[in-house]
């Protein structure tokens, strides 16, 4: 018998679906119903002519579970294509966060200085707060948010991961 | 069609009926209500569709399943909104688990009321999303015909399953165009039918090199059509390997064939489970390594190379890691495999196969299905044995079952040589399945002998369908093995819970003979051994519906048994196993 690999891996999966009512519920229901993890999920219409949406899911599990997730996604009727970007090869992942920091004096200056290092932009500013916009991979965003915590972090909104393969070869 | 308006325009209800007829539907099982009245009106005005008025929507679903499984066609159900739909949910789940093609049409409140908590409103597409293969909410009459055609395509293609169409009342009354079914490829749902030929040749090489091969087939063979069963039979004979079948697969290979080693799994035969455990190459065909089959996973057939043919990629490597998966329709892959076998010049090791059969035959000698034939009581196994003996010469016998001990005995003691003659709730294990399923089978095969092998508890769960059976004059036979217990629950309580029979005994059961008469059927009863044959004969000979109340030994248990969480070579063979030797020579352990 083939030995079963039990290490937990993190995978980024892109799913191209018909943009119709209930399609996100089908995908999310599949994950909750079968006990799979969702670390992040983004969805938006990406092709208005063909009426297609693209869902990007970051999930984790053993290789057997990851295979199951892809097979289960693949058999949903409105799903056009499922691509495991982690296995597919080189790809880029980006996430955007809006980070609100409240503070005055030294903490406020420090927040602005760190934002500069991370190339975060201040989208809004008041006498005692900033809203920063930061773009990067999940690790960069996590690091930035962690650094903001002692400086008056009060609110965060993140988009979740969007991902695309490098080179030609579109997901169709 | 009488609802015809000018220029080929029809109302939604009429479009639905036209689409159903064009999809080959001749029978709909249903129950009317406020939200489907326009459809019932359209049914009233035509004569191509027969409507069977059930007594509960669950009954409609199981009847459609029985109809589909015995005929190979897609079953069709029509129910109203709200409770109509929710009552159908158990049947949808059942069809999902057993991969049965059924299209269920539910009425819905008018579109402008959806989401307003209207009378008899339920979010049925939301409720049924996880228990249908796909579902639709039709919001526009112009997409209706296309949606119905697509629903039938999805239900019957690939791994079949239930599809639900939710149909708001205002759309039924709106007028639009009818589109006949078009032969166009579906834009996303295209199951892979043909297996990869290199993999098939590789599989043949593995099978030819095997010293202890086994072929383990399931419901996927039945779903692929009768031709797949013929090909399976041919392949088994070519290989000389033993063949075992799952509960869902019974009939895919002739039970009377000497290469058949019986059903496998929790209540499978000793020889099939040990052969699965000890084999060196396993060919799984349209079967899904269900937990009732594998037992303890880390001990499941530890020394074998596994080949798995399945149309559903999500069935592969789900529970058991296989060495060679072949994705494709069983019928198509087996066609190629039989050809590849004949083309491959490699010789099999015939001596090894003979030795393998010597080993299997020593297991067979255990006679694992034996039971006490001298008790003086009607043993449930004996009752089914007699039913089989007295009906086996007929070509047209269909058996359905409820769920529990009687179901396992039916699987063990009634033998099937052909596919599509055995209808049981395998995956979901739905008590109350057998009676409505038998009704559906009888509708599809009016002249056949259709017997629901039942337990008294299960059959009471949908007993109201006796009224449908009476109205449609269906000569369904209900063969109740009455032990006054929830037998399988009692068996587990006996074996695993110290004999504390919590709520598994039923007092105040109805008098089934009188119950039959109340439903205009014939009631028969056997309480003594010497009455059994007469009752069976009277049941078979009757041209009416019959309830035969067979009062069996209430203490009997189903053996062999692999207790939950145990391995295939850790079977309990019978009560004496427990009494005599807690650990037998084969390392069988008791739980």
Image: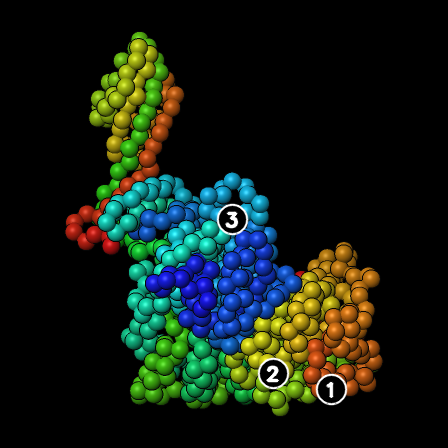
Residue at left offset 36%, top offset 49%: A20
Q: Residues within 10 Å of mark 3 (few under 14, many from 20)?
A: many
Q: Position of residue A124 (x, y in %)?
A: 28, 19
Quarter of the image where the N terminus of chain A is located: bottom left
Instruction: Classify residue A38 as left or right of residue B198.
Output: right
Closer to the eye: label 2 or 3 = 3
Upstream in sequence: badge 1 or badge 3: 3
Q: Residue furthest top?
A: A105
Closer to the eye: label 1 or 3 = 3
Q: Position of residue B35 (x, y in %)?
A: 54, 53
Report the disc number at residue B448: 2
Report the disc number at residue B537: 1
Residue at left offset 52%, top offset 80%: B419
Label 3: which secondary element: loop
Report the disc number at residue B105: none
Same subunit, tags 2 and 3:
yes
Upstream in sequence: badge 2 or badge 3: 3
Viewer-side residue, B341 vs B570 = B341
Report the disc number at residue B109: 3
Residue at left offset 21%, top offset 26%: A119
Residue at left offset 34%, top offset 55%: A79
Viewer-side residue, B497 vs A20 = A20
Upstream in sequence: badge 1 or badge 2: 2
Q: Is residue A19 visible?
A: yes
Q: Is residue B566 visible?
A: no
Q: Position of residue B567 (x, y in %)?
A: 57, 66
- Which chain letter goes with mark 1? B
């Amino acid at each position: 018998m083939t030995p079963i690999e039990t290490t937990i891996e993190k995978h980024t999966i892109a799913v191209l679906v018909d943009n119709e009512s209930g399609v996100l519920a089908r995908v999310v229901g599949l994950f909750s119903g079968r006990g799979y993890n969702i670390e992040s999920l983004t969805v938006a219409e990406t092709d208005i002519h063909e009426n297609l949406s693209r869902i990007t899911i970051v999930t984790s599990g053993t290789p057997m579970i990851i295979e199951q997730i892809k097979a289960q996604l693949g058999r949903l009727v409105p799903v056009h294509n499922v691509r495991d970007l982690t296995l597919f090869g080189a790809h880029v992942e980006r996430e955007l966060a809006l980070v609100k920091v409240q503070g005055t004096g030294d903490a406020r200056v420090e927040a602005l200085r760190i934002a500069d290092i991370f190339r975060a932009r201040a989208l809004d500013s008041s006498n005692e707060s900033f809203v920063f916009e930061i773009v990067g991979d999940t690790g960069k965003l996590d690091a930035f948010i962690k650094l903001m915590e002692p400086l008056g972090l009060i609110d965060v909104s993140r988009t979740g991961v969007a991902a695309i393969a490098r080179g030609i070869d579109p997901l169709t | 069609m009488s609802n015809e308006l000018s220029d080929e325009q029809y109302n939604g209800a009429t479009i639905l009926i036209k689409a159903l007829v064009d999809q080959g539907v001749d029978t709909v099982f249903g129950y009317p209500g406020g939200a489907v009245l326009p459809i019932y009106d359209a049914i009233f005005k035509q004569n191509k569709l027969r409507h069977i008025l059930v007594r509960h929507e669950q009954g409609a679903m199981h009847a459609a399943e029985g109809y589909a499984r015995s005929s190979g066609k897609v079953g069709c159900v029509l129910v109203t909104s709200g409770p109509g739909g929710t009552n159908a949910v158990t049947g949808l789940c059942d069809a999902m688990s057993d991969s049965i093609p059924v299209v269920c049409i539910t009425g819905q409140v008018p579109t402008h009321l959806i989401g307003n908590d209207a009378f008899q409103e339920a979010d049925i597409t939301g409720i049924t999303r996880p228990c249908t293969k796909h579902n639709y909410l039709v919001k526009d009459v112009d997409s209706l015909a296309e949606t119905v055609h697509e629903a039938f395509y999805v239900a019957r293609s690939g791994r079949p399953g239930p599809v639900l169409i939710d149909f708001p009342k205002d759309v039924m009354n709106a007028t639009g165009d009818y589109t006949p079914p078009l032969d166009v490829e579906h834009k996303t749902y295209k199951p892979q039918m043909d297996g990869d030929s290199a993999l098939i040749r590789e599989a043949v090489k593995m099978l030819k090199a095997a010293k202890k091969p086994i072929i383990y087939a399931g419901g996927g063979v039945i779903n692929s059509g009768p031709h797949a069963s013929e090909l399976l039979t041919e392949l088994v004979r070519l290989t000389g390997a033993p063949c075992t079948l799952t509960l869902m697969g019974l009939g895919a290979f002739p039970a009377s064939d000497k290469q058949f080693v019986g059903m496998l799994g929790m209540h499978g035969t000793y020889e099939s489970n040990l052969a699965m455990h000890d084999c060196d190459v396993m060919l799984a065909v349209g079967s899904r390594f269900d937990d009732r089959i594998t037992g303890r996973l880390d001990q499941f057939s530890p020394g074998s190379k596994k080949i798995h043919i399945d149309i559903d990629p999500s069935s592969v490597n789900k529970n058991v890691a296989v060495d060679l998966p072949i994705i494709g329709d069983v019928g198509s892959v087996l066609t190629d495999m039989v050809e590849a076998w004949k083309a491959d010049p490699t010789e099999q090791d015939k001596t090894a196969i003979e030795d393998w059969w010597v080993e299997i035959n020593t297991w067979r000698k255990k006679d694992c299905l034996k039971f006490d034939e001298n008790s003086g009581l009607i043993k449930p196994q004996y009752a089914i044995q007699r039913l089989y003996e007295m009906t086996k010469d007929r070509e047209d016998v269909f058996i359905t079952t409820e769920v529990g001990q009687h179901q396992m005995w039916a699987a063990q003691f009634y033998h099937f040589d052909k596919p599509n003659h055995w209808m049981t709730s395998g995956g979901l294990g739905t008590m109350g399945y057998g009676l409505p399923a038998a009704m559906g089978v009888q509708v599809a095969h009016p002249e056949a002998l259709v017997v629901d092998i039942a337990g008294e508890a299960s059959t009471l769960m949908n007993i109201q369908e006796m009224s449908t059976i009476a109205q449609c004059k269906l000569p369904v036979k209900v063969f109740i093995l009455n032990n006054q217990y929830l037998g399988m629950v009692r068996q587990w309580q006996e074996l695993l819970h110290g004999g504390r029979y919590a709520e598994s005994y039923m007092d105040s059961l109805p008098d089934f003979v009188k119950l039959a008469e109340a439903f205009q059927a014939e009631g028969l009863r056997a309480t003594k051994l010497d009455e059994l044959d007469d009752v069976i004969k009277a049941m078979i000979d009757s041209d009416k519906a019959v309830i035969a109340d067979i009062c069996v030994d209430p203490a009997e248990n189903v053996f062999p048994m692999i207790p939950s969480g145990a391995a295939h070579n850790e079977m309990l063979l019978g009560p004496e196993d427990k009494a005599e030797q807690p650990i037998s020579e084969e390392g069988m352990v008791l739980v």
